[in-house]
Amino acid sequence: QVHLVESGGALVQTGDSLRLSCAVSDGTFSAYTMAWFRQAPGAKREFVAAQPWNGDKANYADSVKGRFTISRDNNKNTVYLQMNSLNSEDTAVYFCAARRTYRGPYDNAQDYEYWGQGTQVTVAS
């Protein structure tokens, strides 16, 4: 069983930056496409960003392009989400997800095999 554990969520102010981390227990981390999704209260879970395992370029939701950056450290089995210029619309629980396939599309939550428990990000205006 693969375990994903997110961390880094916090209460921040509009315009602040925050970095989320997701540690993966599986030693074959480098073979997983990693992604971040988020879910606001009363809303559907939505795609944020994905980093394919084969080195293809990262993929982002339009709402976060230019502000968020996904990256991975295969030596640490960890994927990160650097979030800049945060605003109230970014308030949500952020989930880390993993799947073995590298081809897109990347925005369908049902295509991901493993999920973390989520970490809360709250942006105060």
Image (spheres, grey):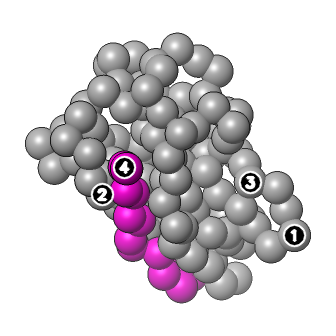
Residue type of the residue flagged with mark 1:
Gly
| Mark-to-mark CA distance, 3 and 2 | 21 Å
Task: Determine which residue is flagged by label 4.
Answer: 2
User: Between 121 and 88, which is closer to the camera in this rendering?
Assistant: 121
Residue type of the residue flagged with mark 4:
Val
User: Between 122 and 97, which is closer to the camera in this rendering?
Assistant: 97
Residue type of the residue flagged with mark 3:
Arg
In front of the other: label 4 or label 1?
A: 4
The answer to whether residue 19 of the structure is visible from this angle is no
**Is disc 3 surrounded by few (<14), some (14 to 19) or many (20+) residues within 10 Å?**
some
Task: Determine which residue is flagged by label 1.
Answer: 42
Q: Position of residue 87 (x, y in %)?
A: 66, 68
Examine the rendered structure and indicate whether residue 10 appears above or below residue 63: below
Seen at 33% across and 17% down, the residue is: 54
Task: Determine which residue is flagged by label 3.
Answer: 45
User: Between 23 and 57, which is closer to the camera in this rendering?
Assistant: 23
